[in-house]
């Protein structure tokens, strides 16, 4: 059995947000994929999740053995009407689980 067979991807639940916050905070602090300078707190990430969910954008969580190991979301690229069909997507994977095909899923 490969690692990919153990990965589950599903819609994000509010209870996933603390783990998602940790994954993103690590990327802000140590990575180069985010333009944020300060890691967000859980309430800020929860508000982002609720806002994107209310706007109908996907927010997905990857799990291995019910442990949150990554997430992805999409949001409006720009507010101008000409960009209405474009989205910005983000994918973050816990550094301990990279190289297992999670982002690809």
Image (cartoon, rainbow, N blue to C red):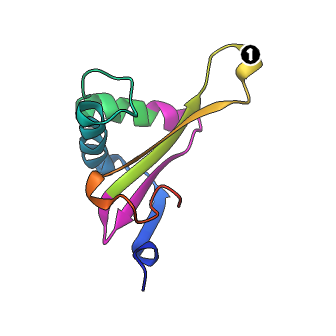
Q: Which residue is rendered at x = 61% and y = 25% of the image?
A: 77
Snapshot quadrant of residue 2: bottom left
Say which of 25 and 67 sits in front: 25
Residue 66 against residue 93 in the figure, above or below: below
Q: Which residue is rendered at x = 31% and y = 67% of the image?
A: 66
Q: Which residue is rendered at x = 31% and y = 36% of the image?
A: 31
Q: Which residue is rendered at x = 38% and y = 30% of the image?
A: 34
Q: Position of residue 21 (x, y in %)?
A: 28, 40
Q: Which residue is mark 1?
A: 81
* Image quadrant occupied by the N terminus: bottom left
Q: Position of residue 51 (x, y in %)?
A: 47, 30
Instruction: Provide the secondary structure element on which disc 1 rests.
Output: helix
Say which of 29 and 53 sits in front: 29
Q: Tell me if mark 1 has few (under 14), some (14-19) or many (20+) residues whose alpha carbon lies within 10 angstroms of its own.
A: few
Say which of 71 and 13 sits in front: 71
Q: Residue furthest right?
A: 82
Q: Is 105 in the magenta?
A: no
Say which of 104 and 82 sits in front: 104
Q: Position of residue 80 (x, y in %)?
A: 69, 13
Q: Position of residue 58 (x, y in %)?
A: 55, 44
Region in magenta: 51-68
Q: Is 62 in the magenta?
A: yes
Residue 37 against residue 12 in the figure, above or below: above
């Amino acid at each position: 059995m490969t690692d990919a067979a153990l990965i589950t991807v599903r819609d994000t639940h509010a209870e996933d947000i603390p783990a998602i916050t940790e994954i993103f905070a690590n990327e802000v602090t140590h990575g180069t994929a985010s333009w944020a300078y300060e890691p967000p707190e859980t309430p800020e990430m929860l508000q982002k999740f609720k806002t994107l969910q209310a706007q109908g954008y996907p927010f997905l969580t990857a799990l291995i053995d019910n442990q949150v190991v990554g997430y992805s979301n999409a949001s409006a690229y720009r507010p101008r009407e000409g960009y209405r069909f474009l989205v910005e997507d983000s994918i973050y994977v816990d550094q301990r689980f990279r190289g297992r095909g999670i982002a690809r899923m």
